[in-house]
Amino acid sequence: MSTLVFSAWLLLSSLLAGFLGALTGLGGGVVIVPVLTLLFHVDIHYAIGASLVSVIATSSGAAASYVREGFSSVRIGMFLEVATTLGALFGAYLTSRVSAPTIGVIFGIVLLYSAWASFRAKHDYHTDKPDAMAMRLKLKGSFPTPAGEDSYVAQRVPAGFGLMYLAGTLSGLLGIGSGAVKVLAMDQAMRLPFKVSTTTSNFMIGVTAAASAGIYLSRGYIAPELAMPVMLGVLAGSMIGAKVLVKAKVPMLRTVFSLVIVALGFEMIYNSLAGKL
Amino acid sequence: MRAWDDQRMDDIISNMLRFGVLTAAALVFLGGVMYLFQNQGPVASYHHFHGEPITLRDPVQIFLGAIHGRARGMIQLGLLVLIITPIARVFMCVVGFFTQRDRLYVAVSGLVLAVLLYSLVFGH
């Protein structure tokens, strides 16, 4: 295959990955690593490097166009960033210690979990019950609703912090945004409102990915000619996806995409165990 | 310095992110076009990991490669701008919290900034 054709296929796949990632809220990273390794036979380290870069592009691009954060949710994000960036450093450190098949199996499990989590019914549990630690760290705020100001206070801060460390580790190890684990930490453990956890999660994904991307770059895991079509494709695809999402509800596409992710998850685990990765 | 309100903070961050991503994408695109013109043969194999050379790993050398018009250096410079964008965002948050005289969060965001800079500078 010529370099031009190879790059064109990468661009097209990345465009699709970014598009579907934006529609489902799972991000393009979870698809692009399996596609690069399983379809294009790229070494998993290069795949993770290219994916991380595209994760930063998507997160920053999306935040530039619609985010309205304000100081209260920046505080929550920044506090949890301490956990995710430290986790990301640990994850990037693990990448050089752990074998490719092991990374593949962990990746497969995370894919299956993400698909399952996207199907699960979601509840908004937020409360304004004062929590001593959250009050001291100012992890609270309010947002306007048709019925007036609705205020919230974070709950179970240590559990959320711990899960965020895990999310950061997975992000650094696998080159993904690990949005599914971040949602688990913010919606489920800390009981933050959806509105807050969505903007905060997006803010955090870019910063977390930057923490491990620096290490990936200096270790030589980022191959420019691979990252080029992947980054441009995922970025363009996710921008188109975000536009479509505003206009149309897409439950059917979400279901199909979740099934694709389940299939990729099993494929990753199978190929890793069979020594084909 | 006057305290930034939420609106001011959102505007500054939003503009900075847009500028960072667009600059990065433009550099990567330019480098990509150059790369594809210069490499018309069969594609290299990426099945085994070799690691990129130092010229594509070290921020200073990447910059030098790009200004000398090397295609891969140009792409890598774009990716470097992209990695720096969220770091710059955290820096703006440090400044924002400083204007609000929120010492706790100047410290928290300063810590995050330190971790990010550590990764970029001492990562290897």
Image (cartoon, rainbow, N blue to C red):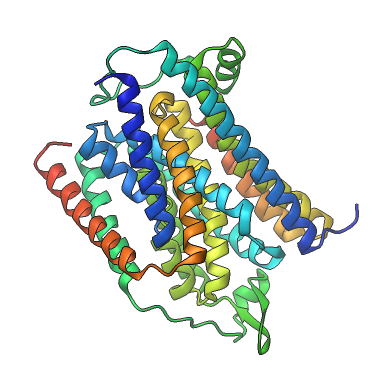
Image quarter for residue B2?
A: bottom right
Q: Position of residue B17 (x, y in %)?
A: 65, 45
Q: Is residue A206 above or below residue B52?
A: below
Say which of A251 and A47 sits in front.
A251
Q: Does residue A85 show up?
A: no
Q: Nearer the viewer, residue B44 or A82?
A: B44
- The relative height of residue A77 versus residue B91 in the rendered view (above or below) is below
Kindly identify the residue that appears in the image at 48 percent across and 51 percent down: A240
A195 is higher (above) or lower (below) than A55: below
The front one of B106 and A273 is A273
Image quarter of residue A76? bottom right
Furthest residue to the bottom? A147
Q: Residue furthest right?
A: B1
* Horizontal arrangement in the rendering, residue A257 relative to residue B89 (left or right): left
Q: Is residue A253 left or right of residue B59?
A: left
The image position of residue A41, as x and y in percent, is 22, 32
Hey, which residue is sitting farthest front in the picture? A247
On screen, residue B66 above or below A250: above
